[in-house]
Image (cartoon, coloured by chain):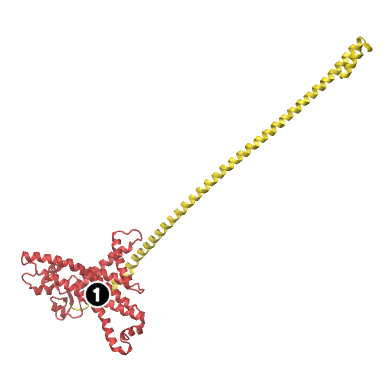
Chain colours: A yellow, B red
Amino acid sequence: MNINLTLFLQMISFAVFVWFCMTYVWPPIMQALETRKTKIAEGLAAAERGAQEQELGRQRALEVMQQAKTDAAEIVAQAQKRYNDILEQAKQDADAENSRLKSAAQAEIEQQANRAREELRERVATLAVAAAEKILQQEIDASAHKTLLDSFAKQI
Amino acid sequence: MSADALTAQHYIQHHLTNLTLGLHPEHGLSFARSSAEAAEMGFWAIHVDTIFFSLLLGGLFLWFFKSVAEKATAGVPNGAQNFVEWIVDFVNENVRGSFSGQNPLVAPLALTIFVWVLLMNTMDLIPVDLLPFYFQHLMATFGADPHHVFFKVVPTTDPNTTFGMALVVFFLVLYYSIKIKGVGGFVGELTLQPFGKWGMPANLVLEGISLLSKPVSLALRLFGNLYAGEMIFILIALMYGHNLIMDVSGGLMQLAWAIFHILIVTLQAFIFMVLTIVYLDMAHQHH
């Protein structure tokens, strides 16, 4: 119960304990707590950001899909149009070729016919001359054969 | 203990005497063999038991907290770290709630006070005769008379401990009052309120008393509560060794008082811490 030197020793011990606590105990623990606090805050913020980004990504994906659908429909429509064009073109080409061939054939036929006619005419003339020669050789009785010769000449 | 040779009065007095080492005018440097001898040693004596247990418990506290602090991780804490963080957080919250200034000393000071005082108070829950009994027998093997070997295991029932802590707090209050407010500001605070400059003597008396009452009340509150608590344990212990009914009722009373005393043990440590924070906060405030 007496107040004595113990008082000073206890004061010194207390001061040393406080100093020790302040130097070696408190700062590392507080630092760990602070770091954890920051980490948790960062984690929560990152989670929030992630959720936002996911939502944005989802919307973006929807947009892309919509766009792709529109593009695809457009491409199909274009292809259809192109198909029709080509078909039409081919029809026209075929018609043109058809008439061209037809007219060429017509011309050929006409040419052939003309040539045959010419040839025939030459042959008939030759034949007529030959016939005439023969008749002339046999007898020429101009008066008797005059009618015949005339009809020949008319025919030529 | 209380049976034959010792009367109740001796028993109580025996338990309230510290193991005092000092320079006795007749016996020289020795352990006091009675409370009268301890008193005769005057100021230059030390209470070995108080010093031993306070250093042991303070060392235990700092060793445990330091070992946790070294391995402290910002990741998932293990059990020990979780426990330490729980206490540190509790103290830190109290400091933040009551202390408005910026001072890196206050929070570690509060932590040291809370845990150290709590540990010293908890020594009160060890049955009063247990440690003294073994210590007396140990000393008897060295040739000491066991009846004159004193041993007090609760450092906070020694006013040297509580006044020592309170004085350190008081010096901190003075230091920071002068540092923050300047000598003029501090003197002004002591002399110019509450009655203005014409009531200076009255102001000085009032403020001086309120200033000095801080360490005194801080020390006496802790000492008084723990001293009274220990006294009741001693009185209950007097009931043992007479007959079965006394033994059983004494045991029940000791149990009941110990359970209630847990509250006092914690509460007094908490009050000492909170008042220290508040006093230092007042020292940091400008007017």
The answer to whether residue B70 is visible is yes
The N terminus of chain B: image quadrant: bottom left
Where A119 sits versus B238, above or below?
A: above
Q: What element carries label 1?
A: helix
**Residue at position x 35%, y 67% from top?**
A27
Picture quadrant of residue B28: bottom left
Picture quadrant of residue B115: bottom left
What chain does mark 1 sit on? A
Picture quadrant of residue A106: top right
**Residue at position x 48%, y 50% from top?**
A62
x and y, in percent, of residue B221 in the image? 22, 75
The C terminus of chain B: image quadrant: bottom left
Number of marks: 1
Residue closest to the eye, B145 or B210: B210
**Residue at position x 32%, y 79% from top?**
B175
Residue closest to the eye, B235 or A55: A55
Residue that extends furthest to the top in the rendered view of this protein: A138
The answer to whether residue A6 is visible is no
* Drawn side of residue B128 relative to residue B186, left or right: left
Residue that extends furthest to the bottom in the rendered view of this protein: B198
x and y, in percent, of residue A17 in the image? 28, 71
Q: What residue type is labelled 1?
A: Gln
Where B40 sits versus B244, above or below?
A: below
Q: Residues within 10 Å of mark 1 (few under 14, many from 20)?
A: many
* Drawn side of residue B142 relative to residue A72, left or right: left
x and y, in percent, of residue B225 in the image? 19, 73
- The residue pinned by badge 1 equals A10
